[in-house]
Amino acid sequence: MQRCLLLLVLLLAGSPAFTQTAPPTSRPDSLVAGALAPAAPDTLAAIHKLFATRRQRRRYLVGGTALATVGGMVIVAASTPYDTGSFQGLDRAINTTLIGGIGLGVLGAEFIYYHQYSRKKERQAVDAFQQQKLPEYLRQQLKTNYFH
């Protein structure tokens, strides 16, 4: 009898306690009726984390692309010997300009793509979420790793 009572106390002590909280509600713009909505502070924090990680990724990519472009231009300029009697000096200038042009094109594309994660766009996304009109592309990008 004592062992059963001790086992019962231990089982009850290990079970989760139920408190008086409001029942979870579903969002009116949810695709699935009755789907549980995450709390607004969690979603706002996830939106901020999404934009912050994308801006950090942009810094790394732009920095790496700029370093690769400048490094490539320096390597081409230094590796090609300069000979006044041939077209090698012209080849060096063309190759250096070509690498610089490609690098600038890639940098421009990165800036254009990552412009959608600027602080201004983040404020617009937060305002849209508070009005319960979060764009579909942002809803798709909010994965579970942003909610921690």
Image: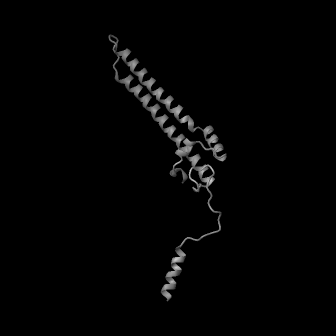
- Outermost residue on the bottom side: it is 1
In the depicted structure, whether residue 7 falls above or below residue 18: below
Give coordinates of residue 63: x percent, y percent. 48, 35
Relative to 27, 81 lies left or right? left
- Outermost residue on the top side: it is 85
Give coordinates of residue 66: x percent, y percent. 47, 31
Quarter in which the C terminus is drawn: bottom right
Give coordinates of residue 27: x percent, y percent. 62, 53
- Outermost residue on the front side: it is 33
Q: Which residue occupies the foreground of this view, 139 or 116?
A: 139
Residue drawn at 33 percent across, 19 percent down: 81
In the depicted structure, whether residue 55 falls above or below residue 66: below
How many dots with numbers?
A: 0
User: Where, by quadrant of the figure, is residue 23 drawn?
Assistant: bottom right
In the depicted structure, whether residue 82 falls above or below residue 73: above
In the depicted structure, whether residue 146 falls above or below residue 3: above
Residue drawn at 51 percent across, 38 percent down: 58
Relative to 59, 123 lies left or right? right
Q: Which residue occupies the foreground of this view, 36 or 45?
A: 36
Q: Which residue occupies the foreground of this view, 62 or 144?
A: 144
Relative to 85, 17 lies left or right? right
User: Where, by quadrant of the figure, is residue 121 drawn?
Assistant: top right
State the colouring used for the structure image.
one colour
